[in-house]
Structures are given as structure tokens and as C-alpha cells.
Image: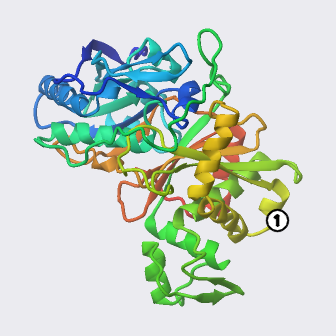
Amino acid sequence: MPSSPSFTLVSRCTVSPDQKSDIKTLKLSVSDIPMLSCQYIQKGVLLTSPPYSFNDLVCFLKQSLSTTLSYFPPLAGRLTTDSDGHVHITCNDAGIDFLVVKSPNISIHNVLVPGDVPDCVKQFFTFDKTLSYSGHFKPLAAVQVTELADGVFIGCIVNHAVTDGTSFWHFFNTFAEITKGALKISKSPDFGRNTVFNSQAVLKFPPGGPTVTFAGDEPLRERILHFSREAILKLKYRANYGCLLTKQTNSEVLGKLCNDSWKSVNVETNGKVRNSNDEISSFQSLCAQLWRSVTRARKLEPTKTTTFRMAVNCRHRLDPKLEPYYFGNAIQSIPTFASAGELLGKDLSWAADILHKNVVAHNNDTVRKGVADWEKQPRLFPLGNADGASITMGSSPRFPMYNNDFGWGRPLAVRSGRANKFDGKISAFPGRDGNGSVDLEVVLAPDAMLGVENDPEIMQYVSEFL
């Protein structure tokens, strides 16, 4: 809840679904349960002021949120644990929190100011530092709408044991779609639980539930680094061919690099051959560069093992595939390891290649093995950076964040709250300009952030963000 003098809480109420749920309970899966020690997801969109009064907007949002919840009844429920230790979502229509906040001294410019993300952004979200296990006695979601001097921020907060990023943005997009006037939603959630993630394994919790797995009081800096489509293209070329992009580069190769869609290209440059079977993607190229730059900035010993951990969507990796809009968590963590000396002693191609191979190898068999391993030893999701040498990449530039048009235009920016942030936590957002541009929300210790800011290898690809 906002506590700054610049923010005034006007009202807080409960919004319930406008129809009773047909679903009684949903059991948490092997992918849901580990997230009970994670904090609620906090993401939101910055918008210009609507063409009607703020009071009217609040009324419209409440009505559309009530309708949206009828399509997503688990979000209006509560967590319960049965006598066998299994955790369920009880779809009891208890509703979610809806907060109205005013901040007349904060403007759009204050939010988008170049440099570190301003502290005022953290005030756009409720349920600060709330663990997902708290869904046993707190709402599983909340919406906070904040009126600014010249705009509006709509924050969505959801229990991470109930949704992953795919389901979170599906709900948020649907909320915007209905507010805009849709009479029927374009994409319906799938609540089926007959999947590989459904398990009889039980994770036992201490009395009162789990604790957060990372330190929450360390000094941190947070910046948004914007990478244009052209910058991403140059990184991808360098990762695939081990050399910088020049004007003389074959135009056919460039065109296919732009679209991440190779069909019959086989090019040799500086002794490196790439074809459609082993192409390193744009995002893998960007991750590899970030891995190198952060590791260099941390000034680690050459023998120190570094980790780049990436959460991947398993819906399409399974055979048979899950429904694209399967509701819940369907993610697994892929860690890639390299010593600091090896990572920095070799070129970008080497780092990008080991990330690429690890992602490609995460297929149906790997997903199922991950489930079986968890069932043998149930455990929480390992958020944090205990050894000082880890990076965790979350979110995705593929999420339709800028589709959140509530009726008067696309968002100006996407921002997140304080949740689940620690030294080395990175979140990937699509750039507002689209066409393959990417924004990285980078959270680092102050010394490491300064090192990245002074690293020409990565900063040559970063353009001003506003």
C-alpha cells in the first residue's frame, strides 16, 4: 500500500466475479508449488490520461474487472492445504483487492526519467514483499490504479503460485480487452489439470509457511536498458558469426537475421558456420552479452563458476503440447554454467552457443525428467544470488505487454514493483517500438551496475530509453 507523502490512498475495496465459478478447486502443480516462496508478481502499464474523468475510469475498471474475473475464477479464490499436504486453489469467488490512489505531484516524465528507475514506481503496487504462500489468507490478486498529474498507472499484482508470466499477461490483456468494450474475450484460459505437472508429491512447509529465498535488504540499483531492433541484429550477427556487422554483409542473411526465420542459409564467416539447425537466436545473443558484461563488472576470480539461469515456458516443449493458454505455471529453470575466466576469455559466440544448446536441449524428455526429479526431492524455486556470481533472467520479450490498450491507446511503458528483486535479477520486456526491440530491466549491486554502465562491449548496443 502506498506510504509516501506523494501518494494518497483514496479507496480500497473487494471486486468479485460477476458470475459464480463453475470450478470448485484447482490443485497446485509441480510447477506451481515451488513458487509459494516467491513474492507476488507486480507488473503494470503507464498510460496517458483517458478522455473522460478519473472517477469514470475507476467505475469502468471495476465493472470490467468483475467480468474478467468470471473468466479467471481461480484468481478470485484462496489457497487451501488439505489433510494430505496438497495445496489447492479454492474457487470461492471471494474476490480480489482494488485500490484507487492519487499522486498529483508525479508526472509521466518523473516515471520515465533517464537513469535509474525512480523509487516512486514501487508505490504503484500493493502486496509489497508478500509471499505467495500468503494466498492462504490474502487475496490471490489485486489491481491498483494510480492517477498521476498527466497520466494513469494500472498495476496488476498476482500470486506467483497461481500464474506464470504467460497466464499473468493473458489475464491482464483480457482485463484491458473487456475494458475497451469487448463483448467476448479473444482467448479463453484452459484450466485442465491432466498434465505431466499434476503430481501426488507433497512439499512440506514449516509452521507459518516458507520464507523468501534471497536477502531483501541489500543495496540495489535498477535500470532499464533499451536495445533497438538494429542493435539486436548486430548482436545476433556477432554471436552467430564471431564478427561485427558491416555494410558489405550479404543482404539475404541480414533479412533473415531480422526475422529470426532461416530456411536455407548456410554462411561461413571467420571460420564459423551457421545454418537453420544451430542458429543462435536474438534473445540468446543478448543474454550472452549481458552475462559477459555483468561477470566482468563483478570482477570475479577467473576460477569462480558463474551461472546464467533462465525460466522457460514448457507448454510447447511437451509432447503432447499443453494448450497455449493453459492457466497456471508451466515453467522450468535452465541453468547454464561457465567459469568467469572461460566466459570472458572466449568470444560472445562461445557464450551464446552454450546458452543456445541448453535451451534447445530442453525438450519433452528434459521437462519430464525435471518433473520426476522434483517429485523425488520436492523443493522451492531457488530465487537469489547466494554466491554473488549468478544472473536470473525472467519474463520474456514475447509477452504481449503493449497489448494492454484499455480504450485510449497503447501503454507508454511497462514497469514492475519491488517483488522478487535481488542482485542479478533481469527481466526482459518487449520494446515499445516493437519489431524485435527489447528492454532489459537490470537489477544489480551498485558497483556491478557502475561496471556495466562503463562497459563499452554492451553499452554500444544500448540506446536512450524514453
Q: Is residue 159 above or below residue 365?
A: above
Q: Which residue is mark 1?
A: 345
Query: Which residue is at a point 52% across and 20% down the rendered structure image?
Result: 133
Residue 109 on image: x %, y %: 36, 39
- Quarter holding the N terminus is top left
Describe residue 389's horizontal placement relative to residue 358 as left or right. Answer: right
Q: Sort mark 1 into few (<14), some (14-19) or many (20+) by Cα contacts within 10 Å.
A: few
Residue 8 on image: x %, y %: 32, 14
Describe residue 212's horizontal placement relative to residue 2 as left or right. Answer: right
Task: Tally the numbered discs.
Answer: 1
Describe residue 329's horizontal placement relative to residue 9 as left or right. Answer: right
Relative depth, front residue between 84 and 277: 84
Q: Is residue 88 above or below residue 114?
A: above
Relative depth, front residue between 376 and 328: 376
Q: Which quadrant of the structure image shows residue 53?
A: top left
Q: Which quadrant of the structure image shows residue 234?
A: bottom right
| Amino acid beneath label 1 | Gly
Q: Secondary structure at mark 1?
A: helix
Residue 420 seen: no
Query: Which residue is at a point 67% across and 68% down the rendered structure image?
Result: 353
Relative depth, front residue between 136 and 267: 136
Q: Is residue 246 above or below residue 321?
A: below
Q: Residue furthest top?
A: 207
